[in-house]
Image (tube, rainbow, N blue to C red):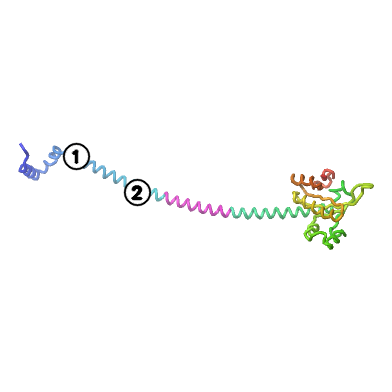
Amino acid sequence: MAFTVTDFNDLVQLLNAHPEWRGELRRLVLTDDILELPAIVRDLAEAQKRTEARVEELAEAQRRTEARVEELAEQMRELAAAQTDMQRVQKQVLQQLGKLAEDMADVKGYVLEQRYRTHASAYFGTRYRNLRVIEPSSLERVEEAYAEGQFTPGEWRSLNKLDVLMRGTVGIGPDKREELLALEVSWIIDISDVERAYERANILRRLGYAARAGVGGHDILESAKNRARELNVLIALDGNLDQDEESLIIG
C-alpha cells in the first residue's frame, strides 16, 4: 500500500501530539552515519577551538621569536659597529706603531752613524790606517767642480747627504796611497743603501779621488749583500766593538 500525502499529514499530526516518538522515528528513518553527525560536528567544533587556541599559541610564539630576532639583529648591528670602531682603532694603533718603528729606526740609524764616526778604526782598521772623518766640502776638487758646473746640483746634494765620509791610508811601500771611504749607514742595510754609497763614491772618483764605497749597519739583507759584492762595496756589520775586526769587514 502506497504512503500518501494524507498519511504523511497524519504522521506529522501524531508526531506533534507525541514528541517522544520523534527520536524513535529518526532512529528508524536515518542511517547510523547520519545519526552520528551531530556528535561529529560537536567534535569538529571542539577540535576547531583547540586548533584556534594552538594557532594563537603559535602566533604568540612567532611574535616572541620575531622580537628575539630583532633583538639579536640589533645586537649584531651594535657588534658590527663596535667591530668597525675596533678596526679603526687597530688601524690607528698600527699606523702609530709603524710611525714609531720608523722613528726608532731613524734614531737607531743616527746613533749607529755616530758610532761609525767615532769608532771608524774599529770597523775599518784592517783596511785603512789613520782613518778620520771629513766633510765633502773640505775637498778642494769638490768645491772647484761644483763652481765649474762639472756635476749637477742634484749630485752636489747627494754627495753632501753622504752619512759618513772618511779619509785613510791603504797599502804599504810603493802601493801606499790615500783613499776616501764613502759610507752609508742604516740599521738594516738594503740594496738602495748599497747603490747610494756606490753612486756617491763614483762622484768622488769622477773628480779624480781614489774612493771606495761602503755600507755599515746592524744587519744586511741577502739581496743587498749580493749587490755589494757585485759593486765591490765594503760591508761593515755592527757587532761588539771588541770583536775581531776581520769578522766585521766583508770585501
Front residue of 82 and 210: 210
**SS majority, magenta:** helix
> To which residue does mark 1 refer?
34
18 w.r.t. 83: above or below: above
| 204 inside magenta stretch | no
> To which residue does mark 2 refer?
56
Q: How many labels does the image show?
A: 2
**Which quarter of the rendering shows the N terminus?**
top left
Judged from the image, the secondary structure of the residue bearing numbered disc 2 is helix
User: Where does the image place residue 20, in percent across and percent down from the top left?
Assistant: 12, 42
User: Where does the image place residue 76, in percent across and percent down from the top left?
Assistant: 50, 51
Q: Which amino acid does label 2 sit on?
A: Glu
**Label 2 neighbour load within 10 Å: few <14, some 14-19, many 20+:** few
Q: Which amino acid does label 1 sit on?
A: Ile
Q: What stretch is highlighted in magenta?
A: 65-86
User: Where does the image place residue 10, in percent across and percent down from the top left?
Assistant: 6, 43
Cα–Cα gap, marks 1 and 2: 33 Å
Q: What residue sits 81% from the left and 50% below the top?
A: 214
Q: Is 49 placed left or right of 98 in the picture? A: left
